[in-house]
Amino acid sequence: MAGQYYAVPSNGQHDIHLQFQNPPTTPSPPLQPSRSFQGLPARRRSKVKLWFGLIGKWCITVIFIIVIYGILIAYALYDVISEKQKKYFNALITGFLIALGLSTMSQLTHAVQDLRWWILSKRPRSRQKATQIGYASLGLCYSVEKTEDQALLIPGNVSIANLSTISTSSVVNASGSTKSEEYAANSYGIISLALNEGDPDDILSPGTLFFADNKFLFCDGSCAYVFRETNTLSLDNPKSAPVSAVTDRKVNITAHCDALKVRQGGNGTGELITVNNGSRETNITLPSKEVLGEKVYMTSASRNCGSDCSIVSVFEPSSTDPWFYNCTVKMSPVENAKRPEHEVSERLMRLATSAIALGGPDGPNDTRSNSYPAASVFGIPLNGSTEQVEYLLSRFATGMLAAVIESNTDIVLAGQMPTIGQKLNVSHWESSP
């Protein structure tokens, strides 16, 4: 033990007192109080359980996404769906979307609970990217709407074209006579120029809804007409257009022509012409014409080629390049006809195939003829082109048939009635950003 001595005065006398003092010590810091736990107690799960839980919930979400995509794709493949199918779709898609939402909410809730330590210790990252990609891609714009292209066919009564006769009441006052039918046939052929024409690639598939602005006949060298059927119930509804659908029934009208060079009388001023018919020359008497210089189409019932065709001759006058054509115009049987009412009558076949030469003055030997000025479609000089003449004859005959069908009163039969159905419309399939 160490000590120090200090001189201490006492009453003026110098007394020496020994005084022992401990050395000065440095004060120690105060003791910190123990920290008590604050917050909610939590225990970390093992990594195995953690990842198994995450993967399991992720798989459940993926399964719901796949099922929803499957439902959308399956119903989108239908061209048209019925009201009953629409109800099934709404029930399925609504149920699985609700299940997907609940599954995703549950997954995110458990993910935050399980990964809170990891989330707090790491920098911010996008969470559950794989699940979010699939879920975000379901942000689709889809709706169930009335179809505008494909008809829903159901059993019922349908209105089909009357192919047994030709209606003359809308063209001439008299009806039933041969002369009135021939005049009406020619008039319908000319009127048909107003009908929309397409090529064979424009032919609609069976069951497609037909509208007034659709193509009526389809030509490429020769022409074809595709039949349609109409819902009889829609004909009585003044607030909407009739519901019509294209069928698989079709008729083709073809023409084959031989071009002969006119050697004499080609200017069209006389009634007799001479043509070069191979190795010999043939004289042909023309019917009388009210206007000289017009292209003349001629036919005769005595020149028979069958019940489904007509022989038509064409004289194309010219002062420099006159031609004469011998042509056969033929109508095919109706493709896919299933009953007699689907077939074109023999009388209508003969009228259609010869219509371009009907309606004018009669000639000798039961000859029918009609002429067209050069300014008209059927009077244009073709200078020996058989392909163009064949097209004009086929176009006139097919157009006449189409116009007659529009004018005739339809007949009603039992069949597959076209109606307006529903369709699942998905505007885009890509994922949301």
Image (spheres, grey):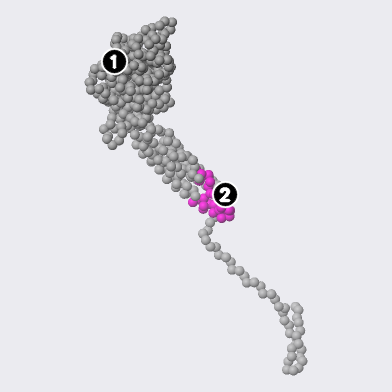
Q: Is residue 126 left or right of residue 365?
A: right
Query: Residue tagged by mark 2?
Result: 47
Can residue 103 be seen at all in this image of the molecule? yes
Q: Nearer the viewer, residue 408 or 65?
A: 408
Is residue 384 a member of the stretch shown in magenta?
A: no
At x 29% / y 22%, what residue is drawn?
A: 162
Q: CA distance from mark 1 to mark 2?
A: 102 Å
At x 33% / y 23%, what residue is drawn?
A: 190
Residue type pointed to by label 1: Pro
Answer with the quarter of the image where residue 12 lies. bottom right
Q: Which residues are magenta?
A: 109-134
Query: Residue tagged by mark 1?
Result: 361
Q: Position of residue 294 (x, y in %)?
A: 35, 18
Residue type pointed to by label 2: Lys
Please say if 98 is above or below 17.
above
Q: Secondary structure at mark 1?
A: loop
At x 45% / y 42%, what residue is drawn?
A: 140
Q: Check the image and name the residue furthest to the bottom.
A: 12
Q: Position of residue 370 (x, y in %)?
A: 32, 17
Q: Is residue 427 left or right of residue 84?
A: right
Q: Position of residue 135 (x, y in %)?
A: 48, 44
Circle nearer the N terminus (1, 2): 2
